[in-house]
Image (cartoon, coloured by chain):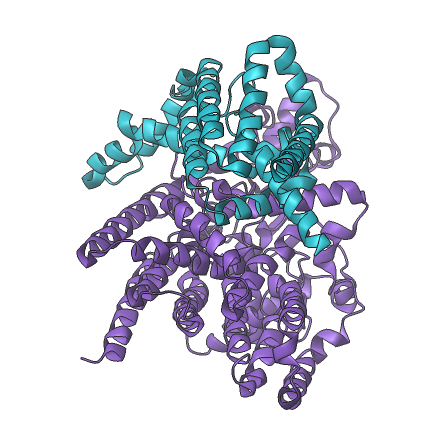
């Protein structure tokens, strides 16, 4: 009973620290969400909390709750993003496509068509653009999280992968795949990944404290 | 066949295929001859013919060029080789191509010495992908010093790693690193940064009692090599590239810049998809510095690198991985991918770790071979598309396209006088000097002796130049239209309205491969201009009154 109580206190301590970090880091962004869409705000904070619990306790109950919240958050991500816009070419892009297709030597005209003009190639290029945009660190650390926390985040990612949370790692990859299709330009930004970034910063911070204490 | 022999055969195949990529149409792609290339070439010719640079300075330690004070190794090496070769574009770019081939060889030697991969074929796969990487192919075809600096530095790195195992290699390591300082600006900052980190990270190995003698001797050689540089260390010229980050920039902004730059250099988006370098001369259409598929091995390799960092070989790679971008990140507000070239070596080693990890998970050997064939074909196709199809046309103007044609036009009209507008390209005089093969001994007479006398104080060069039948400067519309001459400029220099107003007749036009105007030339008609002014009742200019 005593051990259980001690573990619960530690868990609540982490949870409290995590929530402090949450409001400190995402305060302004979260305020906007809260004022505009309270349901999303609730789902978002629920996802963050259950992600932390699933990471630190590895209990199936927490994992199931996290998955449920994650699915809801993913649905909101898709709903609040005008992803069709991501796959439409502007007139300037069409001009450029035609110009580039004509740059190929005549005997390679077909290759030029395949690489520069074919609809499937264009869609693949657009998807590629989205994919690499969500891997751009400046996207998150310029607009949503402070610069100074980048080392903590990287260190957190390292510890996260090292600790072998395959289940959460798969969900992280899934969130990146979803974002690569929807694009980064949602109404509230690419928030599907934010719980993970927050977790990484938090893990990085705890590990740093642990290292200093050592 | 022994395994070693087979390894060498594969290596020869890799170098042969790399050579095809580096030398194929090297004189035509990049289109044009960039001003830095022209300036390097003309100064090499000048040194070869007169022992002086374009300003008449005898064997300079740093070459002033356009004010960059470039380290001299590339120019002196070119000048020496001009005894055997003609000063063509192919010749000047070939030095970089040979540097890239040598760097491929040393890359393979380095990864083999590091014994960092589990499977033998991975060493050759990674070397192949290193050799055909867009970053190296691009730099292998430049007519200036960046790639030479890179390879000299990499040879120094190779020996500095060997020195951790065998002290005698110290005798090569630091002197070669010291020599690299004379090859390129990058290495001027990177070599001391690397040596400092090397001492810090490997202090227990490096400063062992039995090694100290070799170490001191090596450092002594390194310092001796630096004597020419030390003789000018107090001058403005030596520190010219520091101005970017020691100027009046507030500390907070500077720190922010450095963080943003570091993020950009390590960002998968920058490395594998879209290069945020604002200089179009540094980039290739639709491809970044590495192939897009490499970003997965990059992420895996980065994790593995830091996971195994306690082992010496991984610490060495991590040291390079972190130190090699520092000079680039500190050098100003904008990303410059050329300054980050030393990052290519550790980056490819790390990507190789990722490839090795993936391959070790594949049980069937034929599946590995199919994957290799698929990714190498895909990579070569992407390279062909971006570098050999789109780049020559898209980046022609950025690479100073058209000066050879302009020089031909000037040479074909020796009796004409020419005025060339340089409002948007102050360095264009160098293109004409090179393409017209103007004798350096003659040009040195045209340059004000003040620059020669205050060479290392970094005096500012004027904007007007003249040699042979050419004057170069900004167009003064109150003067130049009253002289019998041909005015030549880019598409913005003379508008159709101005040509009509000043009664000028178009006599020359050059378009780039995309059909946009690069140069336009107009013959002035002072007499007709005066007659028109008289008819309109305008006040006549001094020239009209005196003629």
Chain A shown in which color? cyan
Can you give x and y, in whole percent of width and height, for residue B417 in the image? Answer: 57, 48
Q: Nearer the viewer, residue B532 or B261?
A: B261
Vertical order, A75 against B11 (above or below): above
Vertical order, B185 against B361 (above or below): below
**Quadrant of the image occupied by residue B192:** bottom right
**Residue at left 52%, top 25%?**
A190
Can the viewer see residue A101?
yes
The N terminus of chain B: image quadrant: bottom left
**Residue at left 75%, top 54%?**
B460
Can the viewer see residue B333?
no
Report whether B285 appears left or right of B524.
left
Q: Nearer the viewer, residue B146 or A181?
A: A181
**Residue at left 51%, top 57%?**
B307
Can you give x and y, in whole percent of width and height, for residue B390 in the image? Answer: 36, 41
Give the residue furthest to the front: A1
Report whether B192 appears left or right of A80.
right
Can you give x and y, in whole percent of width and height, for residue B393 in the image? Answer: 39, 41
Vertical order, B191 against B329 (above or below): below
Can you give x and y, in whole percent of width and height, for residue B502 in the image? Answer: 60, 28
Q: Nearer the viewer, residue A24 or A140?
A: A24
**Quadrant of the image occupied by residue A179:** top left
Q: Nearer the viewer, residue A71 or B457?
A: A71
Chain coloured purple: which letter?
Answer: B
């Amino acid at each position: 009973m005593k051990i259980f109580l001690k573990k619960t206190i530690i868990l609540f301590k982490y949870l409290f620290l995590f929530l402090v970090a949450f409001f400190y880091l995402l305060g302004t962004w979260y305020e906007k969400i809260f004022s505009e869409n309270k349901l999303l705000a609730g789902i978002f904070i629920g996802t963050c909390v259950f992600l932390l619990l699933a990471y630190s306790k590895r209990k199936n109950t927490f994992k199931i709750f996290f998955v449920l919240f994650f699915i809801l958050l993913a649905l909101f991500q898709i709903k609040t993003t005008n992803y069709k816009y991501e796959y439409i070419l502007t007139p300037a892009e069409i001009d450029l496509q035609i110009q580039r297709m004509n740059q190929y030597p005549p005997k390679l005209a077909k290759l030029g068509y395949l690489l520069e003009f074919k609809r499937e190639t264009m869609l693949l290029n657009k998807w590629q653009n989205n994919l690499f945009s969500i891997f751009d660190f400046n996207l998150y650390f310029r607009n949503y999280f402070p610069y100074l926390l980048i080392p903590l985040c990287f260190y957190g990612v390292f510890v996260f992968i090292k600790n072998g949370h395959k289940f959460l790692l798969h969900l992280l990859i899934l969130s990146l795949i979803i974002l690569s299709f929807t694009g980064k330009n949602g109404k509230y930004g690419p928030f599907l990944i934010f719980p993970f970034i927050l977790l990484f910063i938090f893990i990085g911070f705890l590990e740093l404290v642990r290292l200093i204490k050592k | 066949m022994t395994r070693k022999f087979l390894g060498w055969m594969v290596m020869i195949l890799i170098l042969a295929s790399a050579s095809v990529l580096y030398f194929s149409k090297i004189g035509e792609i990049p289109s044009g001859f960039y001003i830095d290339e022209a300036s390097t070439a003309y100064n090499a010719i000048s040194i070869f013919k007169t022992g002086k640079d374009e300003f008449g300075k005898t064997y300079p330690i740093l070459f002033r060029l356009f004010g960059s004070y470039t380290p001299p190794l590339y120019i002196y090496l070119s000048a020496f080789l001009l005894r055997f070769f003609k000063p063509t574009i192919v010749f000047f770019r070939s030095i970089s191509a040979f540097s890239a081939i040598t760097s491929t060889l040393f890359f393979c030697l380095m990864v083999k010495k590091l014994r960092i991969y589990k499977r033998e074929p991975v060493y050759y796969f990674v070397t192949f992908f290193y050799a055909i990487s867009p970053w190296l192919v691009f730099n292998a075809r430049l007519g200036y010093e960046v790639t030479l600096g890179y390879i000299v530095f990499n040879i120094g790195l190779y020996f500095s790693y060997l020195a951790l195992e065998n002290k005698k290699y110290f005798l090569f390591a630091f002197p070669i690193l010291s020599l690299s300082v004379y090859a390129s600006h990058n290495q001027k900052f990177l070599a001391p940064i690397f040596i400092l980190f090397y001492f810090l990270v490997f202090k227990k190995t490096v400063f062992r009692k039995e090694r100290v003698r070799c170490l001191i001797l090596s450092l002594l050689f390194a310092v001796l090599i630096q004597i020419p540089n030390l003789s000018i260390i107090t001058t403005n010229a030596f520190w010219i590239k520091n101005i970017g980050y020691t100027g009046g920039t507030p500390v907070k902004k500077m720190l922010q810049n450095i963080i943003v730059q570091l993020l950009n250099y390590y960002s998968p988006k920058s490395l594998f998809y879209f290069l945020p370098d604002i200089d179009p001369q540094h980039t290739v259409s639709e491809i970044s510095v590495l192939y897009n598929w490499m970003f997965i091995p990059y992420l895996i390799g980065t994790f593995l690198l830091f996971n195994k960092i306690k082992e010496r070989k991984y610490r060495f790679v991590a040291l390079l991985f972190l130190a090699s971008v520092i000079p680039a990140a500190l050098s100003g507000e904008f990303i410059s991918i050329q300054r980050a070239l030393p990052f290519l070596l550790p980056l490819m080693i790390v990507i190789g770790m990722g490839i090795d990890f993936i391959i070790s998970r594949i049980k069937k050997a034929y599946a590995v071979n199919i994957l290799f064939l698929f990714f190498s074909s895909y990579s070569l196709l992407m390279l062909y598309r971006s570098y050999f199809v789109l780049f020559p046309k898209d980046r022609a103007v950025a690479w100073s396209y058209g000066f050879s044609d302009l020089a031909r036009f000037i040479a074909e009209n020796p009796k004409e006088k020419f005025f060339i507008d340089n409002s948007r390209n102050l360095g264009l005089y160098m293109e004409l000097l090179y393409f017209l093969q103007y004798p350096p001994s003659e040009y040195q007479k045209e340059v004000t002796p003040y620059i020669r006398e205050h060479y290392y104080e970094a005096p500012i060069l004027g904007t007007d130049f003249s040699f042979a039948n050419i004057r170069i400067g900004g167009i003064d519309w109150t003067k130049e239209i009253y002289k019998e001459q041909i005015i030549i400029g880019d598409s913005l220099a003379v508008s159709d309205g101005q040509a009509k107003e000043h009664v000028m007749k178009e006599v020359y036009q050059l378009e780039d491969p995309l059909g946009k105007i690069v140069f336009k030339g107009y013959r002035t008609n002072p007499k007709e201009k005066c007659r028109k002014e008289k008819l309109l009742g305008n006040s006549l200019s001094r020239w009209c009154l005196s003629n």
